[in-house]
Image (cartoon, grey):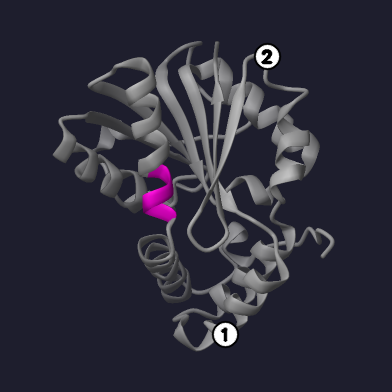
Amino acid sequence: MRRHPAEELLDHDAGTSTEIDDSLADLRRINHWLGGIATTRSLVERVATRTESKDLSLLEVAAGSGDLPQTVRRQVADRNLRLDVTLLDRAVSHLRNGNRTGRVAADAFALPFPDNSFDLVSSCLFAHHLAPHQFARFIGEALRVSRHAVLINDLIRHPLHLALVYAGTPLYRSRLTRHDAPASVRQAYTVREMENLLKPVCSARFEIHRFFLFRMGVIAWKY
């Protein structure tokens, strides 16, 4: 199954305010039930264990409504890990959660922060939107801003994954999701492709893990 880049409607807010809100709600349910939250939580906990940290700052890029990192923040608190979350998205209209000082509207390719500003820079369902040259640019910026690692939570392209997405179509509330969900799978990267994207841009090591229902989790270490 070859990769097929495509425009996704939510990227351009190509719908009514109700359709956009429903699509963001669809994403929240997908991340909750189909492994998105669990993937990011696992990556955060791996870094915390490796660095022996009990207090981590995290910048979530392309955060959307911000529910995923905020849910992870609450969950890891159960194991005495404090996660200080800052949300960044290109569209301020997407940023619904977090306090005013923890929400930033900015370009993911030119993060408006000094070097080493956050322990972690994270993204969920963002990498598959990027062409290889854009991915390299984003990782370079994310590594610059991070102190420990960059976390990537994304889909794995596979024919069975695409079939499952189509099977779930009646459950989607928004027509944007009905268009964007299969488009996301078609343009997602395989694990081998992700390895090939990371090798030229990561000076330190990286690790890729497979998670529930065709999710991949990447930790690209700063040092």
Position of 213 with respect to 43 (left or right) is right
- The image's mark for residue 121 is none
Which range is magenta? 36-40
Residue denoted by label 1: 167
Position of 11 with respect to 2 (left or right) is left
Residue denoted by label 2: 203
Q: Residue 100: give x, y in percent of width and height.
A: 26, 37
Q: Residue 41: give x, y in percent of width and height.
A: 35, 42
Q: Nearer the viewer, residue 87 or 185?
A: 185
Q: Is residue 153 depicted above or below 29 in this figure?
A: above
**Tag 2 secondary structure:** loop
For the point 51% across and 22% down, the residue is: 112
Q: Nearer the viewer, residue 55 or 177?
A: 55
Q: Nearer the viewer, residue 79 or 184?
A: 79
Circle 2 crowding by C-alpha within 10 Å: few under 14, some 14–19, many from 20: few
Dominant SS of magenta comes to helix
Q: Is residue 29 depicted above or below 100 in this figure?
A: below
